[in-house]
Amino acid sequence: MAGPVPEGGRDVRLDFFRGLSLIFIFIDHIPENFLSYFTVRSIAFNDAAEIFIFISGYTAALVYGRSLRQSGALLATAQIYRRVWQLYVAHIFLFVIFTAEVSYTLIAIQSPMYAEELGVGDFLQAPHIAIIRALLLDFQPPFLDILPLYIVLLGCFPPVLLALEKYPLVPVCVSAALYALTLARGWALHTYPADHTWFFNPLAWQFLFVIGASLGYAAVDEHHVSRVPTWLSRLAAVIAAGVAVISLSWTLHWVFDPFPPLLAKQLWNHTIDKTNLTPLRLISFLALAASVVHFVKRDNAFLEWRATRAIVVCGKHSLYVFCLGILLSVLGHFILTEFYGGIGTEIAVNLAGIALMIGAAALFEWFKAASRRPRHAAGPVPATPSE
Amino acid sequence: MMRRVLLLLPGLAFVASLASGGEREHGAAPGRDCGVPRELVEDEPRLPGLAERLHAKQPVVITVIGGGSTAGAAAGGPANAYPHWLEAALRRRHPQAQITVINLGIARQTTEDMVQRFAAEIYPSRPNLVIWETGTVDAVRGTDIDDFTAALESGIAALREHNSEVMLVDMQYNSGTASVINFEPYLDALHQVADLHDVYLFRRFDIMRYWSAEGMFDFVDVSKENRAALAAEVYECLGENLAEAVDFAAQ
């Protein structure tokens, strides 16, 4: 979620890949969407959520790290909490819309055939509790689970940032230990209703966020992404390529049964636990990220293409575009189920959603630029906050 | 992820039915067209043990374990649930064989809950085939996908150890519930497990979605009194197609 423009020039790749992850999240959130064959999860064990959380950690450290250097710990912390507040408000906004949809849908169905499925509507029996639980981030309906994770991660970020300033390697070591213990001990955060847990376990996912933050903080000084040793880049590329081949073979197997799914019996079980960011997903993502950093330099020509710019703008206004994407996937699914028209309709719905996301991002971009421009001699109009 | 490609099927099947002039007639229950494209009913691994018994005209015991939709309360109870219609359809298809279908559906059980019941309720009757309908409650409760998969795999292994052949049935489809429950990871896992462990999978979700796309069962405009009758019709069609699947697997 974009911050003030860095002095060393903005690394457009961050915006681009975050924008891309938002588009993937939109596509993947439409159930049974044919286009999700073409998102990152077809060629990796991870999906767009890892990209989003990693880049969020990276930019948080970059933006608030700079703020820490320039204005001190107190202001940096205050800025972080202003951001947490914005995320919280956005989450509650999405929750209200989601609740409206669920209430409407469940009351419209009313068929006893779906008694078990309607268990999800139990909260309609006790809305007074469900709403308080939602305000406490304790009740997370499906598809509304990334923002609570991000809120918790950012809420715990100030001490991490201060530690990064003094001892750059300590946070990632502590974080790795917490991740390992979480996996080994099966620690989880419980939610409402009592037998549910967080879909994204923050105790596991914090590791990816802190890895991103550690790298992002290093970039505060150097004005460029920390150099990855050549051997490490090569290793990462080999792993990413191997994962891509395996993952693609699984995807192809589902489309065309006789195609053999490579190593599925050995590996598949270890790739599904998204809740706890299973090590194979983490490794797959880190290898992919390191390869991308190696092969796509920050001055790569493709970052100037028109189509690329459109996605970059989405990444710059990621909070708004993210929320819009979540709403659009709900709406898109509704349209597809109500007016089913085959693959043509499906592609049209996807394209319309992406166009709306890009259009909204362009509008925010215009608004931000226009608000900054002083009008006449009346003095500058206060700029809208850029994060 | 396999499932997503099947979204194309209604469109493809429509074209195919135009071309062949009647791909869909199989699976038709008496008095109603329950037809679905063959691809939705036919799956890979066969059931040689069941085939042998049917062929030799020996008695066959099929146990169906599952949740509320197996119990059939929406249609007035087991007498109208799909296992009942499965039994009727199989008896019609194999008049000489002595076929018994046992219904062990209980509402609101997770996969793990059902596995716990195997020893007491399934093994003693030594079924030749166990049809296992599961996944709904896990998706609704958000069971850890790891735990769901592990329970499913242990259940399949245990049933096979007790000399039963296994068939899996996935969730029901309804456009409303599909938009508020995140079924996809559980469907994917169920289908993956079926594929990895060579289990015949009955694609109830896709079949019901096909019916929904074709506008076959209208739940919106049905009056309260007629809901149970409509549910019974859906179950009858499911039982008919399930019988088609069992027959296909037991060739």
Image: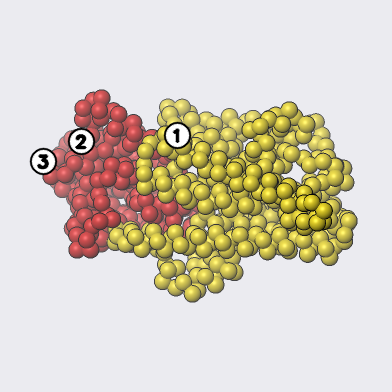
Chain colours: A yellow, B red
Name the chain under label 3: B
Residue reaching furthest to the bottom: A128
Name the chain under label 1: A
Mark 2 and mark 3: span between their CA atoms?
21 Å
Q: Height in image: A137 above or below B203? A: below
Is residue A18 in view?
Answer: no
Q: Height in image: B13 above or below A67? A: above
Q: Which residue is drawn at 56% across and 48% down?
A: A325
Q: Height in image: B209 above or below A161? A: above
- Amino acid type shown at disc 3: Gln
Mark 2 and mark 1: span between their CA atoms?
25 Å
- Amino acid type shown at disc 2: His
Tell me whether circle 2 and circle 3 mark residues in contact (CB < 8 Å). Answer: no
Q: Are the residues under marks 2 and 3 on the same chain?
A: yes
Label of residue A133 in the image: none
Q: Residue at x 49, y 74 (%)?
A: A128
Could you tell me residue A207's position as x and y percent? Answer: 70, 52
Q: Residue A41's image quarter?
A: top right
Q: Which of B47 and A60 is in front in this view?
A: A60
Label of residue B96 in the image: 3
- Amino acid type shown at disc 1: Trp
Tell me whether circle 2 and circle 1 mark residues in contact (CB < 8 Å). Answer: no
Q: Residue at x 15, y 48 (%)?
A: B88
Label of residue A254 in the image: 1
Q: Residue at x 62, y 31 (%)?
A: A242
Q: Mark 2 points at which residue?
A: B26
Could you tell me residue B100's position as x and y percent? Answer: 19, 50
